[in-house]
Amino acid sequence: ATSGLLAGKKALVTAGGTQEPLDPVRYLGNRSSGRMGFAVAEALREAGAETILVSAPNELPTPPGVRRIAVMTAEEMHAAVMDEFAHMDIVVKAAAVADYRPLANAEQKIKKDGSSLTLELVPTPDILAECGKKKERQFLVGFAAETEKLYEHAQAKMQRKNVDMLVANDVTKPGAGFGSPTNIVSLLFPNGKKIDLPQMNKLDVARRLVQEIAERLSEKE
Ligand code: PMT
């Protein structure tokens, strides 16, 4: 039903959980499987958009016709997104990006010595917020993964990061968020409109997002 809706458009999606190295064998990560972002890339491509998928490490196959750029850390994801941003019409940030990384990445494997170990963490760049500052014609979609006060936190993120649509998921609900094949999301818009979607598989959620994006892009033109 979305075929051709986004023909001629260029889109970029981020997916997966970034990995922030501690030493040659360890990293700080999160539970994102990449499924949600990969589904969005597939749905954008289906709708005819030329699609780039900036992905943190995972085992998922690249959707046909999509160009994949592999990254590991938040900083690498930031660089890859910013390289492409100016040419994009649509940017969807489904990745779970580390907010902090270890200050030091030890050259050798960290050895235990029986005492406690303190890690010093430093903030990573907020990629979505930077896109929100730089955006001109781009239609910018953010996600919000929340464990409490879903609407309040999501609403605040939408404003702070200057996005055109925010996809909020309560990741404590069974069947929603990290890892599962389905998601339960609400779509928030800057004009106050809110759409609560039922539990759907991630590709169906993605197709619905594409419809909402296409409608609003054509309103902008
Ligand atoms: O990958 P799956 O297993 O399928 O799971 C899907 C998902 C739960 C990861 C996905 O639905 C989701 O919610 N993705 C966003 C996860 C997240 O990091 O949310 P956040 O509320 O911490 O971040 C808000 C937004 O800012 C996100 O669009 C995020 O990509 C972006 N961000 C965050 C931090 C940062 N340093 N840079 C960013 O761009």
Image (spheres, rainbow, N blue to C red):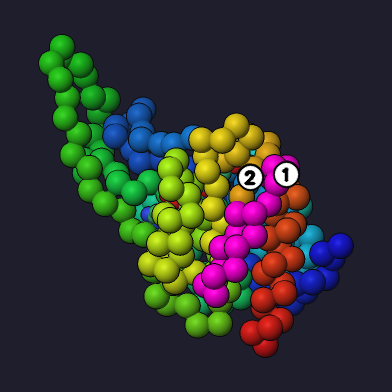
- Residue 84, compared with residue 46, is above or below; it is below
The verdict on residue 200 being magenta is yes
| Viewer-closest of 65 and 181 | 181
- Residue 3, compared with residue 191, is above or below; it is above
Q: Quadrant of the C terminus?
A: bottom right
Q: Position of residue 95 (x, y in %)?
A: 51, 50
Q: Position of residue 195 (x, y in %)?
A: 64, 60
Q: Is residue 13 visible?
A: no
Q: What's under tag 2, amino acid-wise?
A: Ile
Residue depicted at x 55% and y 75%: 191
> In the image, 134: left or right of 107?
right
| Viewer-closest of 153 and 139 | 153
Q: Residue reaching furthest top?
A: 114
- In the picture, the disc for residue 156 is none
> In the image, 89: left or right of 201?
left
Residue depicted at x 86% and y 62%: 1
Q: Quadrant of residue 78?
A: bottom left
Q: Is residue 149 visible?
A: yes
- Residue 34, compared with residue 135, is above or below; it is above
Q: What's under tag 1, amino acid-wise?
A: Met
Tell me where the magenta segment starts and ends, as one range: 186-202
Q: Secondary structure at mark 1?
A: strand
Q: Position of residue 82 (x, y in %)?
A: 45, 68
Q: Secondary structure at mark 2?
A: loop
For disc 2, the marked residue is 184
- In the picture, the disc for residue 200 is 1
Residue depicted at x 68% and y 83%: 219
Residue depicted at x 70% and y 42%: 199
Q: Residues within 10 Å of mark 1 (few under 14, many from 20)?
A: some
